[in-house]
Image (spheres, coloured by chain):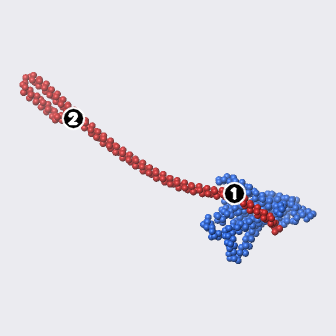
Amino acid sequence: MDIHVSIAAETLFSIGPLNVTNSFLTMVIVMALILILGAWIARRATLKPNGYGQFIFESFVDFMLGIVENTAGKRVGRRIWPLIGSLFVFIILSNYSGLLPGVGTIYLEHEEAEESAQIAYVSQPGVQGPAIAQEDDGHHIVEVPILRSPSADLNMTLAMAILVIFIVQVAGIMAHGVGGRIKHMADPWWIFPLELIAEVSRIVSLSFRLFGNVFAGEVLVAVMIGIAAATWFAVVTLAVPTVFLFLEVLFGFVQALVFALLTLIYVALAVAGADEHGNPEESHGH
Amino acid sequence: MGELGINVTNLIVQLVAFALFIYLFWKFALGPITNMKDQREERIGQSLDRAQEIERELQNTRAQNEEILNESRREAQTILQSARDLSEQNIARSREQAQVQADEMIEKARLALNAEVRQARSELRQEVADLAVLAATKIVRANIDREDQSRLIDEALAEAGGRNGSTPAGNA
C-alpha cells in the first residue's frame, strides 16, 4: 500500500487562475452542508425544542455563547459571536471531515507539470495506491485524493487567520478610534514595532497551528492505517487506526476550540479599555 | 510558498468564501437559533417573574382569606351571642308574662271562688231561714203567740249563725 502525503492541497482542475483543489472542494461541501443543515434546523426550531437537531444546535450555542460572553463581556461577546460561532462550527466539522471514510482515499487521475512536494511513500507490494506515471513530455499523471480536510490546507487556515486579524483590527479601531488603536499599540512608543510583529505573527501562529495539527493528524492516521495494513494482522488493522481516529476526534475539537478562543481573546484584548472611552454600559457589567 | 501550497488566488477566494459563509450562517442558522434562545430565556424570565408575582398574590389572598375568616368567626360569635341573649330575654319575658297571666288567673279564680262562697252562704242562709220559717210554722201550729214566734225565730237564727260563725261566709 502506498501512502501519498502532500503538504499542498492537490489541484483537481482549474477555473482561470483559481485552482480547485481537493481541500477547496471539501470546503465548499462542508460549508454547504453546514448552511443547509443549520438553516433547516433553524427553520424548524420552536421555542419549545422539538428534536435532536435543535437540541444539539442549541447545546452548542449555549456552550460557546457562554464562553464568549464570560470572556469578552455581554455586549462585545454578542457582537463577536457570529464570527466565533461560525469559526468553531466550520473548523470542527472541517477537522472531522478528514476522518470520514472516502476523504483522502478516493483518487482522481490528474496531470501535473512537476512533482508536488511529497513527504513519504510507504509501499507494500501487491496493494494498489495512487500511481505516478511519467509521460514523455515531462508531465506525469498522478492520482490525487478527491477530498481533503479544509483545515489541512494552508490556504484555508491562512484565509481564516487573515480574516480574524482583520476583524480584530476593525474591532480595535471601532472601540478606540484609529488614533486610540495606534496609541493602544504604542504605549510606550518603542513597543509599536513589536506590536506590529505580534499582530502579524498571530496570523502565522493561528494558521500554522491549525494546519499543522490537522495535517499531522491525517498523516498519522494514514501511516497507522498503512502500518496496520502492512502487518496483515487483523486485530491490529482494526484497533490501531481506531485509537488514533479517536485521538483525532479529540484533537479536532481542541483545535477548533483553540482557534475560536484565541480569536475571542484577540478581540477582547483589542477592545479592552474601551469602557473608559465612552461605553458606560459595559463598565457597569452588562 | 509553493511548497506549502499557498496560492494567492485560492487564498483570496477562500477568504471571501469564508466571510460569505459567516454572513450566511449567521443570517440563516446561528442568528435565528441565538434569537430563539434569547426569546426563550426572556420568556422563562417573564414566567418566573409572573410565578413570583402569582405567589405573592396567593400569599396576599391567603392572608386576606384568613382575615376574612377570622372576621366571619368574630361576627358569627357576635351573632350567636346576640341570639343567645335575645333568646334569654325572650324566655325571661315569656316567663314574666306567664307569671302575670297565672297571677291574673289565680286572682280571677279566687274572686270567682269568693263569689261562689258568698252565693252558697246566701243560699244556705235562705235555706236556714226557710227551715226556720218551717219550724216556726210548726211551732205556731203548736199555739204560741207572736212574740214567742219572733223570739223563737231569732233564737233559731242565732243558733244557726252560731253554728256557721267559724266559716268566712259567716262574716258576709
Q: Is residue A27 above or below residue B117?
A: below
How many residues crowd around disc 1 within 10 Å: few (fewer than 14), some, or many (20 or more)?
A: some
Q: Residue at x 75, y 67 (%)?
A: A162
In the image, B118 versus A45, the foreground residue is A45
In the image, A236 versus B134, the foreground residue is B134
Identify the chain of the residue marked 1, using the numbered disc in the image.
A
Q: Residue furthest top?
A: B141
Which residue was labeled with disc 1? A57
Q: Are marks 1 and 2 on the same chain?
A: no
Q: Colour of chain A?
A: blue
Which residue was labeled with disc 2? B114
Q: Quadrant of residue A112?
A: bottom right
Q: Residue at x 84, y 60 (%)?
A: A13
Residue A136: percent from left, percent from top: 93, 63
Amino acid on which disc 2 is placed: Asn
Q: Residue at x 42, y 48 (%)?
A: B76
Amino acid on which disc 1 is placed: Phe
Is there any visible trace of residue A279 in the rendered image?
yes
Identify the chain of the residue marked 2, using the numbered disc in the image.
B
Q: Colour of chain B?
A: red
Mark nearer the viewer, 1 or 2: 1
Residue A78: percent from left, percent from top: 66, 62
